[in-house]
Image (cartoon, helix red, strand yellow):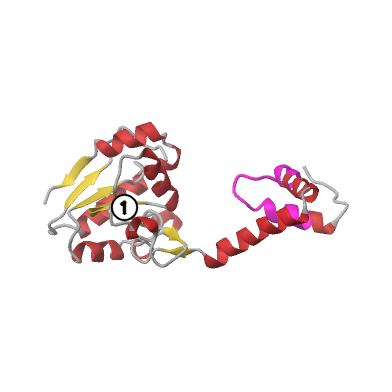
């Protein structure tokens, strides 16, 4: 549905909001009108938080998780098991696994999965930094927590080949997670059980 906007500023706001994933122009208009009804201080706080998010958020130099400093809270926590590294596709996967309360090791965020169709090649992912972490010593187990899709399996296979010959246990989440499902939409109970019942990919 096309609207005739009474204000060019409103039209611009709707246009920008509708660029967000999952938000159409109708929803964007509703959000823009909602913001117009709020105090200027609330709108300024929202705008400031978004600008600071974009400009100031950092990626952990160890695991590539999001953080406010050079090292994320998980990597900096001495109570975490540094001998275990859980390999995930993205930041939301870290949040999902943490919500299960079943894992106390560290993470490694790849930043995606291998997908030649979309131009995502291994060199565009944080795979080499994972190999370097393993080579540095101290890691006894690498857990693959990638979505059970063709792209996820391809990525797991590629990394497994890169880690061949290294004295590290390779495991993967139990396939209690349905093949083809996205890890982002897996409920916490299923994800927790899959993490506990992970399977061995390669023994030491």
Looking at the rendering, the stretch of residues picked out in magenta corresponds to 11-30
Location of residue 177 by image quarter: top left
Which residue, as the protein is rendered here, is positioned at the far right? 6
Examine the residues drawn in magenta and state their main secondary structure. helix
Q: Nearer the viewer, residue 13 or 158?
A: 13
> Vertically, is 28 above or below 111?
above
Task: State the SS at label 1.
Answer: helix
The x and y percentages for residue 100 are: 37, 38
Q: How many marks?
A: 1
> Vertically, is 20 above or below 193?
below
Q: Residue at x 76, y 45 (%)?
A: 34
The x and y percentages for residue 33 are: 78, 47
The answer to if 25 sits in the magenta stretch is yes
The answer to if 17 sits in the magenta stretch is yes
Task: Say whether residue 66 is left or right of residue 126.
Answer: right
Q: Residue at x 39, y 49 (%)?
A: 94
Q: Pointer 1: residues within 10 angstroms few (<14), some, or many (20+)?
A: many
The x and y percentages for residue 56 are: 53, 66
Q: Nearer the viewer, residue 2 or 168?
A: 168
Task: Say whether residue 18 is left or right of residue 62.
Answer: right
Which residue carries the number 1 mark?
155
Inspect this view and state whether residue 199 appears.
yes
Inspect this view and state whether residue 178 appears.
no
The x and y percentages for residue 14 are: 74, 52
Q: Quadrant of the N terminus?
A: top right
Task: Say whether residue 61 is left or right of residue 134.
Answer: right
> Vertically, is 139 above or below 199?
below
Location of residue 41 by image quarter: bottom right
Q: Residue at x 80, y 54 (%)?
A: 10
Q: Residue at x 61, y 59 (%)?
A: 50
């Amino acid at each position: 549905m096309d609207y005739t906007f009474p204000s060019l500023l409103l039209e611009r706001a709707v246009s920008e909001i509708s660029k967000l994933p999952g938000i159409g122009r109708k929803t964007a208009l509703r959000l823009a009108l909602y913001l117009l009804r709020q105090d200027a201080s609330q709108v300024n706080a929202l705008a400031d938080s978004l600008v600071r998010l974009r400009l100031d958020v950092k990626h952990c130099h160890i695991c590539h998780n999001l953080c406010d400093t050079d090292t994320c809270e998980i990597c900096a926590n001495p109570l975490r098991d540094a001998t275990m590294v859980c390999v995930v596709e993205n930041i939301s996967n870290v949040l999902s696994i943490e919500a299960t309360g079943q894992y106390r090791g560290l993470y490694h965020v790849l930043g995606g999965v291998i997908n030649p169709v979309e131009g995502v090649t291994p060199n565009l992912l944080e795979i080499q930094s994972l190999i370097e972490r393993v080579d540095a010593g101290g890691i006894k187990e690498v857990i693959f927590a990638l979505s059970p899709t063709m792209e996820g399996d391809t990525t797991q296979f590629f990394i497994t080949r890169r880690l061949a010959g290294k004295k590290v246990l390779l495991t993967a989440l139990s396939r209690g997670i349905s093949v083809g499902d996205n890890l982002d939409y897996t409920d916490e109970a299923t994800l927790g059980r899959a993490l506990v019942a992970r399977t061995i990919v390669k023994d030491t």
